[in-house]
Image (cartoon, rainbow, N blue to C red):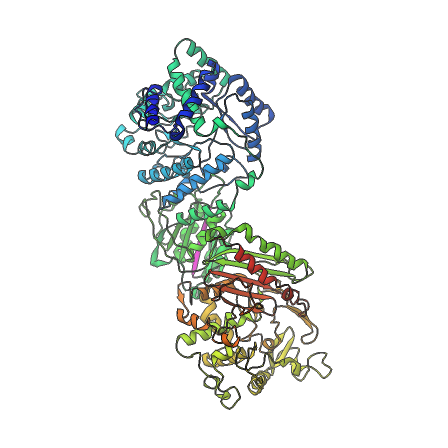
Amino acid sequence: MNKFFLACIFLCFCFPTIAQEINPLIVKKDFQNQKKWVDSIYDNMSLEEKIGQLFMADIFSSDPKSKTDKIKNLITEYHLGGVIFSKGGPMRQAKLNNEFQALAKVPLMIGMDAEWGLSMRLDSTYAFPWNMTLGAITNNKIVEKVGKRIGEHSKRLGVHINFAPVVDINTNPENPIIGNRSFGEDRDNVTEKALAFMKGMQSAGVMGSAKHFPGHGDTDMDSHKTLPTIDFSRERLDTLELYPYRKLINEGLNSVMIAHLNVPSLEPQMNYPSSLSTKVVTDLLKHEMGFNGLIFTDALNMKGASNFKKPGEIELAAFLAGNDILLISEDIPKAVRFLINSYNDETITEKRLAYSVKKILYAKYKVGLNNYKPVKTAYLLEDLNSINDDVLYEEAMSNALTVIKNDRAILPIKDLQKKKIAYVNFGDDSGEDFLNELKKYGNVHWVKANSLDDYIQKLKEYNYVIIGFHKSNENPWKSYKFTQKELVWMYEIARTNTVILDVFARPYAMLDVKTSANFEGVIMSYQNSKISQQLSAQLIFGAIDGKGKLPVSLGEDFPLNTFMQTKSLRRLQYGTPESVGVNSYKLKKIDSLANVGLEQGMYPGAQILVARKGKVIYQKSFGYHDYDKKNEVKNTDIYDLASLTKILATLPIVMELVDSKELTLNTKLSEMLPEYKQTNKSNVSLKQMLSHYARLKPWIPFYRNTLNDEKTGVSSKYYASSPDKDYNVEVAENLYLRRDYIDTIYKTIRESDLNSSKSYKYSDLPYYILKEYLERKYNKPLENIVQENLYESLGANYTLFQPLKKFSKNEIPPTEQDNIFRKQKVQGYVHDQGAAMLGGVGGHAGLFSNSNDVAKIMQMFLWKGFYGGTRFFNPDVLDKFNTCYYCEDNVRRGVGFDKPQLGTVGPTCGCVSMTSFGHSGFTGTFAWADPEQEIVYVFLSNRTFPDSENRKLIRSDLRSLIQEAIYDAIDY
């Protein structure tokens, strides 16, 4: 208590002109040591050294040696107090920082403009969302986290003061210099966001600086080029422009930057810059508003100030006005001499000089310069570009995206089975990330045209059109407007189509859209960053909510705070591992393991996907389609899933029938198919056969009976090289089976013997039987049943039987060089011989897909029958099928699903929960879901190419090792 009382007495003595309630430069818990350090430094300073503390010079770390040497000279000869770094790179800046600090008798205060992160000035650093984007977020804690992270980056690079936040209220859309740098046009929202940002940044040990006082938001001129006029009444300034400063000052704002503005209601002298005005700096900011922190001029080389007085004169005027630090003087040596002369002729008093210099020293102590340490360059780039930055950017952007129009609830897009969607790209920047993300969800095509008529004609094929307006994300000042041609074309496209407009640019772009009447949906995505594009696509398809509010007004149609909240339909999201409690560094072990598989010849290529809590956090492709290494595997390529077909095609349809009470787990084969009544399988139940506990044969090699006598190829009795009315079952390229042979297959199954003892025996036969049953019940082929009942609604557009009807061979890795049966490279045709003899469509095999689509189906299982706004079956149905009914008999299987091993050997790593489920496939595929950890893991490969006898993948247990790596990477 006594120490704090002494502190107050000292402050009143040291800063007698200010009402002392809050002094943001004091370190309360260490005040005595702080005061002692300040006094000892000040008392041992020469006049020249004191004057030098008032100056902060600018330098680009990209500047040549001749310029950096000038800074070194200013430090040694003119006792420079600080340096503001501008453009360059972090490594160069760190090295220069250390060189400069080594020359300084009193450590330098290092400043930067890092409003949205160090990337505002530096390459190879992280760019966080612009203030206008943050202004759309309703949760201010997120803005505080952004401020803190920017502070942490600044501190890591040796920066002590970040000239942020911008608290200008951008009420003028034509403002050429603020715009996206503002949190918006609403006074309260700007204040809340600026306060959150400031608290976050200052909590990281970096000083904040509110700018541009008294307010640069309502001007159409740039003070870098001229002196803008803010011609408003004092009442207006008090209620609007000055409001954020009062709030921030009361919460401990460290510093304020004074703008170069002509404000007649504050400074009656005509065209007198606010930065040089005693009435603005001292009377208003310090006395009336009670600000005790550091006061910086804006750059004194800006035309708004430098046109007014000569070097030396302008610095004196700024200092006498009440500024503490003179930023970027045009001629520091001349200005220093001028101020020394002014001290000697008593224009500057010792009291006035001590007042500012001690404030500067207090600030230096506060940021740790009493114990200065050089910037460490080891791992600097890694520290300034971490996965945690992506996590935060993702969180901020997902909360900022704003739906401002949603006629007939067009957003999020529902009923994908009815939608054919076109994407049209306007603007001058790339929308590739947006398009690729859209394609993960639905049947989306990029439509290009050179004329409006061409567009209108091509778009007739589609029932939805998504227009992406993409403008440069390089910086907030880049052009953001529609061209006149784009506006005309957009109006006409909207007149003749159902349109969703997505604006990846400054919101003010919409001011040129004279009518939005024909746009069913409008989304403000604010920036054209990769993450913004990806998240906006996720919003469109209902993977994430639409939460943001418009931070500015955009005409009558879209007033301030416009928002149409949209709710998630529960589709897969895509994002960072850390956002769902997984360590991305540990997850990289998957890469190493996958590459081991390539190196050891386990497979020529693979796709691996991991999702947690409904979000895909890892999706990569490895290797090539084959060992010729000409065609790299892509995420969109489709693999032969082999036995994954059982749980991804046949089983969900059976589950739907159980849900509708048309089947039960106890339904017998004789009830499903009458021809089984007189067979040895009559009383086999659905539960028994899908648990592989029905004494059925593991498999029947149907193809062997169709080989020629020499067993060197197929018999002409059963096959033809071209199709006709009798030979029309396509088995492979130029190979057609007699159509009546399918009846033979089903007859062979019915008449097959049962195993002598009842024990667990994995069998394909139940799925042959179910295919026959389902096709008879629905009166349509299985490939149509699953498309109509499942895949189209899921948006599983890469999942299908008979893939060559839609995809080229270049998109389908081969599965085997078959030298016995088909005598060809099997590519685009099912590998399984039995499924091939059914025309490529088996209940047990024949499905092709990629990891992303497989994950959708597995996620639907995890969500117990719900996905994308559609309920496929009720939750209790999943529970019925995901139950091990015969565990006591050493049968680990659920009904259709494989389950974790009961002992030490089995399909998983042994680290999964017992409620988990999945399946594997002969071609080298695997899909597994764990309800307790909310994990989906998909592994697809063509390990059977060129030879299905290649069992290296199986012997290595690589798929389980990858699964183990996933679980090891879970942090919480």
Whole-percent x and y of residue 786? Answer: 48, 72
Q: Residue 719, position in %: x, y?
A: 65, 81
Rendered position, 657 above or below 325: below
The reply to whether residue 797 is in sight is: no
Total residue callouts = 0
Q: Is residue 459 above or below residue 206?
A: below
Q: Nearer the viewer, residue 870 or 740?
A: 870
226 lies left or right of 2? right
> Residue, x 34% and y 27% (percent of image)?
4
Image height check: is 425 above or below 849?
above
The quadrant holding residue 92 is: top right
* Location of residue 665 (image quadrant): bottom left
Q: Position of residue 432 (x, y in %)?
A: 52, 51
Q: Is residue 534 visible?
A: yes
In the image, which residues are magenta? 463-470
Q: Main secondary structure of the magenta part?
A: strand
